[in-house]
Amino acid sequence: MSRSAATSGEILRLIREDEVQTRADLARLTGLSRPVIGQRVTELIDAGLVVELPGVSSGGRPAARLEFNGAGGRVLVASLGHTHGHLAVCDLSGTILRQEPVRIGAGIESAIEGWQRMGPGAVRGVGIALPGPAHEDERVVKAVREVFPVPVHIDNDVNVMALGEHRVRNDVSDLLFVKASTGIGAGVISGGRLQRGAYGGAGEIGHIPVSDGLLCGCGTVGCVETVAGGAALLAQLGGRAKDLPELAALARAGDLEAVAVLREAGRRIGEVVAAAVNILNPAVVVLGGDLSGKNLIAGVRESVYQRAAAMATRRLRIEPSVLGDDAGLLGCATMILDHILAPAAVDAAL
Ligand SMILES: [Zn+2]
């Protein structure tokens, strides 16, 4: 940033991310004059993005404190699967204020109706996670914008969950999120940023081949998903569980066969995670999704520590999701807030 050209959006970033609290500090950091800082701060206060609070006296007249106004608007988020999902209304700090489950009977319209029912307030943006490869779905964006004419951003469920898990681990800038469910996929955070790749295909670890993999729905032979994806595991259990929550419940109850199936699935997923660890050298691998209980994670650890390079694993943490079902919603909030509160977006909107 050019010091002499700090815009209102950049002033907001200093207040929101770096917690710069006084006009004097803003002037010092940006090189702008006090009157110009005053103008830009007023603009941000008028827009509801900043609040001014009485300062704490340290002798003499206390300087007013500037704070980012998390209550200055709402974002709507949805973490959607093929048949059901969750909706939430969040504030501008990304805190979930209200949430509810939704059935996707009528497509995105079900989510739109749900948000309207929930009393959305002053909406500034919408973030949506959809299953499958990353894409901006034109039809979904158009339908949402007809009701909520604000910025709408869409990403795939795994990328969004990676953003959510990263938000609660802000000491880490390199994180690999692995979702083990019906499909197997990964979200890559590298250098503090989500990596989508050139065409949005980064993180497709479910379709990396393993030695005894079978013919996959993607048309390739050998994908790890064919031996460790949800359908494969249900088949290995010979119909003893009708779906993945039931399989996970069996394992939690100590069913030896279910435990063995999940442990082995973890080892197989660990084979491709080990390769990813060698390439990306993350500080932490987070396991999420229906199947990511302690048995699967133990299997992943076994393979990764055995197969990945010592330099990449020496201090590597492999741990379960801390957000569970909320990872998608909180990740959606992070995604849309990063967009609408970016300096350029704030300047354009003022
Ligand atoms: Zn495949």
Image: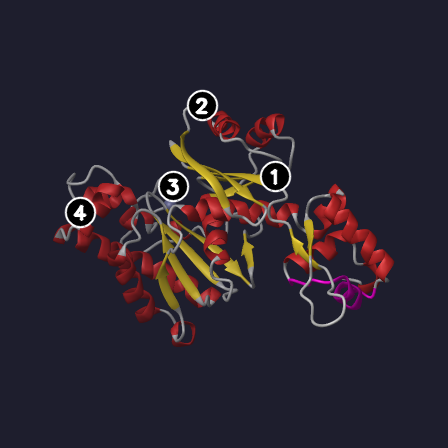
Classify residue 294 as left or right of residue 347: left
Give the residues drawn in magenta, as a range. 18-31
Q: Which of marks 3 and 1 is nearer the N terminus?
A: 1
Q: Nearer the viewer, residue 48 or 229?
A: 48
Q: Is mark 4 on a helix, strand or loop?
A: helix
Q: How far apart are marks 2 and 4 (CA)?
A: 33 Å
Q: Distance between the residues labelled 1 and 2?
A: 22 Å
Some atom of ligand 1 lies within 8 Å of the CB belonging to the residue at label 4: no
Percent x, y of residue 172: 50, 65
Q: Which of 63 and 72 is in front in this view?
A: 63
Q: Is residue 82 visible?
A: no
Q: Earlier in the sequence, mark 2 or mark 4?
A: 2
Q: Are marks 4 and 3 in contact (CB under 8 Å)?
A: no
Percent x, y of residue 266: 28, 57
Q: Looking at the picture, which amino acid does disc 4 mark?
A: Leu
Q: Earlier in the sequence, mark 4 or mark 3?
A: 3
Q: Which mark is residue 106?
A: 2
Some atom of ligand 1 lies within 8 Å of the CB belonging to the residue at label 3: yes
Is residue 238 depicted above or below 40 in this figure?
Answer: above
- Residue at coordinates 76% horizontally, 63% vertically from top-left? 26
- Residue at coordinates 46% horizontally, 26% vertically from top-left? 110
Q: Do the residues labelled 2 and 4 touch (CB within 8 Å)?
A: no
Q: Residue 125 carries which label?
A: 1
Q: Looking at the picture, which amino acid does disc 2 mark?
A: Ala
65 part of magenta stretch: no
Is residue 137 depicted above or below 166 in this figure?
Answer: above
Q: Residue 250 carries which label?
A: 4
User: Which residue bears the numbered disc 3?
Assistant: 219
